Each structure stands twice: as C-alpha cells, then as structure tokens.
Image: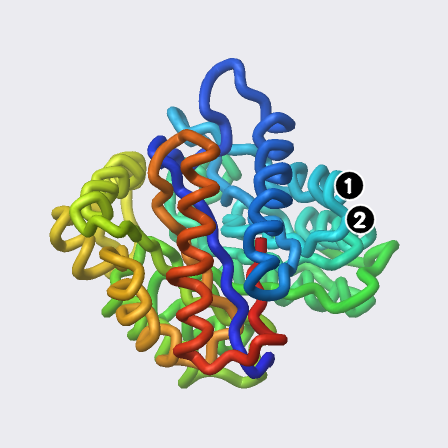
Amino acid sequence: MPSFPSVTLRMLDTGARLGMLTGPDDTFRAVVDRQLARRAELAGIWSRYGAVDPTYFGSGHHWMSHPQQFADPWTVLGYVAAAWPEAHLNSNFIQLPLFSPIDVAEKVVTLDRLALRGVTYVVGLGWRPEEFAAAGTDVRYRVGRFTEIVETCRALWAGEDVKPGKHFQVSGRLGALPREEPTLVFGVQSPKAAERAGRLADGLHVSWVMDHESNSRINAAYQAALVREPRYWALAKFLSVDEDPARAESRLDRMSTMFDWYASATTWTSADVTTAITREQESEKRTITGTAKSVVDQLVPFAREFPYTDLVLTWLAPGTDDAENRDHFAYLCESVVAPLFDELGVPADQRTLKI
C-alpha cells in the first residue's frame, strides 16, 4: 500500500445524469472521446502542482435502465484501452452476479492483454430485481452467485481446473491466462458486504450513495475483516465548492435530480442507503459543501480516518460551459487539492492526481 493516497477529481455537471449518453443523437464513441480530450486538458492544469497518473474511470453498469443510457462497461474499457493506451483503467461499478464466471474470466483476460497499464475492476452485488430477471436469475441469489464468480475466476486465472458449482456449470481450464493477477475491488453499501470484501477482495470502494456515518461504519467493518493488504482502498466523497457558500449550496439540487432514478427502483437491498434527503441534510450528511477552506477542513478528518490508497472526489461543476468548468477545476486544484495534500503531509514528489 502506498504511503500517501492519490486524489481523483471526477466531474458531475448540471445534468447530473447517471448514464453516459446525453441525448438521442449522442454516441458512446463521442462521449468517451470527449472524456479523453477533457482529461488531457485538465492534466495540463494539475501538472503545475504535482504528478498526473492517467486514469480512465468507467460510467458504472446497469441494465434495463430507462431513461438512463448506459454503455456496456466491458466494451467501453476495450475501446479506451486502444484509444488511450497510457492510462490505467478503472471499471467503476460492474454488477458481477449478472454474468457467468467464464464470461467474466474471459473478458478480464482479454482486457489484460489490451490495456498496457492494467485494469482495476470495481465489482458489486447489484440490487435491482429487474436486472437479475433479465439475467435469468433472482436477486435473492446475488450473494451466492457473486462469491462463486469470484472464487471460480480466481481459480481460472491461476490456470487451475474448475468444476461446476452451485450456481454455474463451468468446468475445465482457460486457454489464455492474464499476465498478472487481476485486481478485484468490491464496491459495497453495507458493513456485511465490507466484511466479505475484507476476506475475498483486493480492495474496497464504498458506494458514493452512502452518508458520512454509514461510510465510516462500512470502512471500519472492512478494516476489521482484512486478511491481506489492500491494493486499492478508496474514500469516495462528493464536493460542492465555491467562493460563495450560497452557490455551493444551490448545486446540491442536482443531487436530488440524480437520486430520482435510484428512488424509483423496485427495491433497495441496503438499509444504509438514503435516497430522499433535504438539501440541508445533503450538505450535512453526504456532500461536503462550502468554501474551499471549509471543504478542506471537512475532508481532512475523513481522509485520515483509514489508510486509504485513493481519495475519489466527485465535484459538482458550475455548469455545462467547458471554459467555466476548466476554470473551476483549476480553482479546485489550487484551493482544495494542493492544500489537502499540505494538510495530509504528502511530499511534493508524491502529490498525484488521477485524471
């Protein structure tokens, strides 16, 4: 585990959309190409303050997602591996139990041979019954399927023979093996899932939908259950920062916009998730809000609470104007990220922003 965490700044614009596409005429290629172009531009801004670690974060994964428009995550990762070979890839949340273990194992080997700087897979249990029905199963079996997929894939990647299990009829050995052991990070929303990650995963990423209290409780459960040193352990927080605190508060309305889709889901499987809270509660309990100094003061205790490898900070951008958002990013680099590194005692030569 590195001595000091890296920082990631991810942008949430005024649309507050979960899916990748912004309209009926948009294309996944255009969206990804815009993302890559923006990252190159933002990297130039941060380079005045520290090192840049080129990193592509996927958009997450949902089936049957109307009106959201998600791309298949495996396909997008393959495209980015070719379009941006110098970047490390992070899948973001993939709902693992919707796939078979041989499907996952083969896709990971393929991406291993495509991505020059490797891939971090953030995998979750899933929670929407309609997605499990589309996969020909039931949400009630998600934990058993998830565990069997992880164990079967690990055996296949090690070049071992596998036999059919309880949920999947997979037998034999893989033809091609990965060059290095794949990194499976569990994306979780409950202490019980965090304990499972402590036993089985290579790292932890607590879902961004958790409030501060739940986030701390879940990370503590993970730390208590750890059986190996994590390769990746992320603190994930939303930020709304502005010189005018009232403007920072006003951006929290888009969090409600984002949660509208989640709130309409058939069910939630974690009691730790809250989809309907007031703007005041959002500011107090989930999104770190205020002036740059106030946000840094609030962030530091969270960043020090556990030995994180990564601080994943999603910032609520001022609007949809690219120039305005670039200026705001520069403001965050100077007024939030650099002072945060100062407060955490990160040496100048280890101040890394993942973009």
Quadrant assignment for the N terminus: bottom right
Q: Nearer the N terminus, badge 1 or badge 2?
A: 1
Q: Is residue 319 left or right of residue 281?
A: right
> Which of 93/197 is in front?
93
Q: Can residue 315 be seen at all in this image of the molecule?
A: yes
Marks 1,2: beta carbons within 8 A: yes
In the displayed structure image, the side of residue 93 where residue 130 appears, left or right: left
Q: Answer few, some or many: residues within 10 Å of disc 2's Cα (few below 14, many 20 plus, some between 14 and 19).
A: some
x, y percent for residue 69: 47, 28
User: Residue shown at 53%/45% (left/top)?
Assistant: 98
Q: Kindly identify the residue that appears in the image at 52 percent across and 38 percent down.
A: 135
What label does residue 252 carry, if any? none
Q: Is residue 145 visible?
A: no
Q: Nearer the viewer, residue 149 or 294?
A: 294
Circle nearer the viewer, 1 or 2:
1
Q: Position of residue 243 (x, y in %)?
A: 26, 51
Q: Which element type, helix, strand or loop, lies under badge 2?
A: helix
Residue 114 tag number = 2
Pick the front one: 257 or 123: 257
Q: Which mark is residue 82?
A: 1
Q: Tell me: 56 left or right of 280.
A: right
So how many labels did they put on this image? Answer: 2
**x and y percentages locating residue 4 in the rendered image:** 53, 78
Looking at the picture, which amino acid does disc 1 mark?
A: Ala
Residue extending furthest toward the top:
25
Which residue is at 82% across, 57% downward?
174
The kind of secondary structure element at disc 1 is: helix
Residue type marked 2: Leu
Q: Residue furthest right?
A: 175
